[in-house]
Structures are given as C-alpha cells and as structure tokens.
C-alpha cells in the first residue's frame, strides 16, 4: 500500500464525499410541461436529442441554451433537451420505472444518465442495466473516450460488459483513501514514522494520553465495515466479501472483521472515544469540536475546521491509505436500445468528452450531474485501486428478502464494539444471526457472485 504523509497547516484540505446534494422536489416529471426553458420549436431538419437525468442543477436552462446555440452556430443539425426525473417522496419508485413511465407517454430517450442509488434501492442501477435497456458499448466506442481512466471502465462493467460511459469526475477527487490525522501536539512525528495504517497500532500510539472534556484522544468517523473500502475485501448487503476466498461470509465469523471489532472494543473500553458514538452508523450528531489526538475518517479534514478546533499553530500529520474502487455506475451515461437517434447521441457524448470548448459551456455543477468531465478540477487516480469485486452489485430485491439479517449484521457491530465480554457477545450475535437466516443469505450472495464471475461474462 502506498502511504502519503501530508503536513496540513498551509494548504486547504477538501472534505471528501461521493453523495450528490438532493434538492427538494415535489416528485416525478410533468410530461405536459417543457423539460427545459430552452425548449423551442424545432424545425423538421433538426434532430432533437432527448436526455433523461436524475437531477438538474440551478441555471441548467442557460447552460443548455449556450450548448444549443453553439451547435447551431457550427451548423450542426442536432439540439439537446434535458428531461429531469425524480422519485420525489415516492419511496417505492425506482429510476427505471420513472424512465419507462416517461417513455410510454413521450417516446424513447436518446441518452439517459443514471442518478444516485436511492437509499432504499441499493443496486437498482445494476438491475436497470441488466434489464437490457442500454446498448452495449463497442470497443471502438470506448476507445473514443480517451479522458476516462481504464480503471473506471473496468469498475463500471456489469457481468463483464460495458453499457454505460462512467462518470469521469464522480468520486475520483478528494476521496481516495482512509485518513488518519495525527495531532503532533500529542502524537509526535517520530512516533508514527513506522505507522503502517492498521487500527491495532492506534492502541500503542495512544498510550499515556488521557482523554478529558476538552480532549478526545480518538475521533472515529467510520460506519460498520467502512474499512473494507481501503482493502481488497468488501462489504455488501451487510455481509463481508473476503478477497482471500472471493466469497461472501458472515462478518462475525471472519477473522479480519473480528480483529477489527476487537481493536475498536479495546479502544472504546480504554475510554479513548470519550463521547457518544455508534460504531454501526456514524451520525451527524457525532461531529465534535474538541481537541483530538487522532482522528480517523474517510476524507481529509478541512483546514478551516482544524483552524477553529486546534488554533492557528496546529500541526496535523495525515496518513492516507488507497481507496479501492468498486461500482462506478452512478452518474454514468448510456444510450437506450430504443433510442431514435443512437448514432447522433453517441457522437454527442464523445464530443462532449473530447471538445473542451463545447463541454466548457456547461457549468461544473452540470457536468457533475450528467457525468461529464470537469476541466476546473484535476482528475487524480494515483491513490485509487481496483477492487476484485468491481462491477458486482447485490440486487436490492435480494437485500429486501433478507432485510432483517442485513439490519442485524449492521446494528450488532455497535453492540460488539462496546461489549464488556467481547467473546460472549460475539457468540450471542452469531446465534441470533443463525436463527434469523444468515446461512441462506450467504448462500444467495455467493450464488450471485458466481453468476457475475462466470467465464461467459468476462
């Protein structure tokens, strides 16, 4: 693993994050209302490219008007119309249903950009792609998108094939790794020269440092098995996916998970996390403003926050581990099988990636929303590796069948990390999981892994 030490006292540090902001919208779409304010009467010799997206940024009408004006000035016979779709407050809705309902009333889209995986529909994007909605991209098509790293293409495969153009700037900037922030007021640099990024090392580093009302010796900001994002292993649907066996296992029977939980248990019982904490789910109410000795989170701490918390003379040494990239389908873009203008749509996508002037007509926000490159933010994949589980996603329909097991796996972690008797609590958790049906769940997930990794899909 590559490790990077960064002294964060002068340059601002950006908080990492992959989730897009969700605006308040009443829901769905109105097929009788123009999708964008730049919609105009289109002459018969102009091809209208209809582009369905999950969310539109503020001011998108002006950006798209500029894009269409440029296309017109160049003598191109295509124009672009964006159509926004949102589930609103309908928690039973899926993006694919929104698309299908729209197309029944208005005809097929030419381009569709998948939005965020809604919280209760994890894996829905894979279900949508597996339905056969998108055209499979040819090697020749893929070769035209020279700005997209190969790692993104590999991670965006569904059953070994590419159906969508992965979003270039989604999640590749500023979130590449697990971060340990060491406050040199308490953890001198010479003490961490041999630090290898393991959690067990934290106990030794924190020896002799006493937590107090104004000092949190260990600020811990990870959910459940978030540590797997920075190892070749993975977690899906509450289960642990072992890179050693390439199978799903009960997390509470995995040596790696048990060691991790036992370390957190030791740190908790020693009083280092001296605040209300839920090891299963990190919550907003757990943000701290006290001094700290070590802070562990999945992103860099903003310099302004450090200034406010530690004072202007602080010295924080940051250790970063690589981020293992898995599924890169969110905000990726495809051409529907039923598109009326598939060749024109593909040429437009290629040009928007290759032509800086044309793509520059769209705001950075808009490029983010529809998966186009952002010229103002450099793409850095130096700390990103490809997970052995890249491209695999457990269907939300499978997770729904075992929602009780999945929930029990996640919520039991906090109980284990705080247990007075670790081994007894671990045994009790496993007994409850067995009774709830975890063995059947593991069998199902392993069947899905075998299907996804079948030789015919590679």
Image (tube, rainbow, N blue to C red):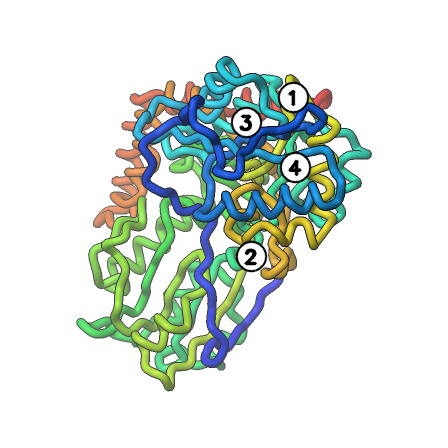
- The residue carrying pointer 4 sits among few (fewer than 14), some (14 to 19) or many (20 or more) residues within 10 Å by Cα, namely many
- Say whether marks 3 and 2 touch (CB < 8 Å): no
Among numbered discs 3 and 1, the one appearing first in the sequence: 3
Quarter of the image for the N terminus: give it: bottom right
How far separated are the C-alphas under marks 1 and 4?
16 Å
Residue under label 4, please give it.
165
Front: mark 3 or 1 = 1
Write the residue at 54% across / 27% down: 126
State the image coordinates of residue 319 (x, y, percent, origin top left). Answer: 50, 67
State the image coordinates of residue 225 (x, y, percent, origin top left). Answer: 41, 45
State the image coordinates of residue 435 (x, y, percent, origin top left). Answer: 30, 21
Which sits in the foreground, 257 or 136? 136
Among numbered discs 2 and 1, the one appearing first in the sequence: 2
How far separated are the C-alphas under marks 2 and 4?
18 Å
How far separated are the C-alphas under marks 3 and 1?
20 Å
Residue under label 3, please give it.
126
Residue found at the far bottom of this picture: 313
- Say whether marks 3 and 1 touch (CB < 8 Å): no
Among numbered discs 1 and 4, the one appearing first in the sequence: 4
The image shows residue 422, relative to residue 436, as above or below, that is below
Residue under label 1, please give it.
339
């Amino acid at each position: 693993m590559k490790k990077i030490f960064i002294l964060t006292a002068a340059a601002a540090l950006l908080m990492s994050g992959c989730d897009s902001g969700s605006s308040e919208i009443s829901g769905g779409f109105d097929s009788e209302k123009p999708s964008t304010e730049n919609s105009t009467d289109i002459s018969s010799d102009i091809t209208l490219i209809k582009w369905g997206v999950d969310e539109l940024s503020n001011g998108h009408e002006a950006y798209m008007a500029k894009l269409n004006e440029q296309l017109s000035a160049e003598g191109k016979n295509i124009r672009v119309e964006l159509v926004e779709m949102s589930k609103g407050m309908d928690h039973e809705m899926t993006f694919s249903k929104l698309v299908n309902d729209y197309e029944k009333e208005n005809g097929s889209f030419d381009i569709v950009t998948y939005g965020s995986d809604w919280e209760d529909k994890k894996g829905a994007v894979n279900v949508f792609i597996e339905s056969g909605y998108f055209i499979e991209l040819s090697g020749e098509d893929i070769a035209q998108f020279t700005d997209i790293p190969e790692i993104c293409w590999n991670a965006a495969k569904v059953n070994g094939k590419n159906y969508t153009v992965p979003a270039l700037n989604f999640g590749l900037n500023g979130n590449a790794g697990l971060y340990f922030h060491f406050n040199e007021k308490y953890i001198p640099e010479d003490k961490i020269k041999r630090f290898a990024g393991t959690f067990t090392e934290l106990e030794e580093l924190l020896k002799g440092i006493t937590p107090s009302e104004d000092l949190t010796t260990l600020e811990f900001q990870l959910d459940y098995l978030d540590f797997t994002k920075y190892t070749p292993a993975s977690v899906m649907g509450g289960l642990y996916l072992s890179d050693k066996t390439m199978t799903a296992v009960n997390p509470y029977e995995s040596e790696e998970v048990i060691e991790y939980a036992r370390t957190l248990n030791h740190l908790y019982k020693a009083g280092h996390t001296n605040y209300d904490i839920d090891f299963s789910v990190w919550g907003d109410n757990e943000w701290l403003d006290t001094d700290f000795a070590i802070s562990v989170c999945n992103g860099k701490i903003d310099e302004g926050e450090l200034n406010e918390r530690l004072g202007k003379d602080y010295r924080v040494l940051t250790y970063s581990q690589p981020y293992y990239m898995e599924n890169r389908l969110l905000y990726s873009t495809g051409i529907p099988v039923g598109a009326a203008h598939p060749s024109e749509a593909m040429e437009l996508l290629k040009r928007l990636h290759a032509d800086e002037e044309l793509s520059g007509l769209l705001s950075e926000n808009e490029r983010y929303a529809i998966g186009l490159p952002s010229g103002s933010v450099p793409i850095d994949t130096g700390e990103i590796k490809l997970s052995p589980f890249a491209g695999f996603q457990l269907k939300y329909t499978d997770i729904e069948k075992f929602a009780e097991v999945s929930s029990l796996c996640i919520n039991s972690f906090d109980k284990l990390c705080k247990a007075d008797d670790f081994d007894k609590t671990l045994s009790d958790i496993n007994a409850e999981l067995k009774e709830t049906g975890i063995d059947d769940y593991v069998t199902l997930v392993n069947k899905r892994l075998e299907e996804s990794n079948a030789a015919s899909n590679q």
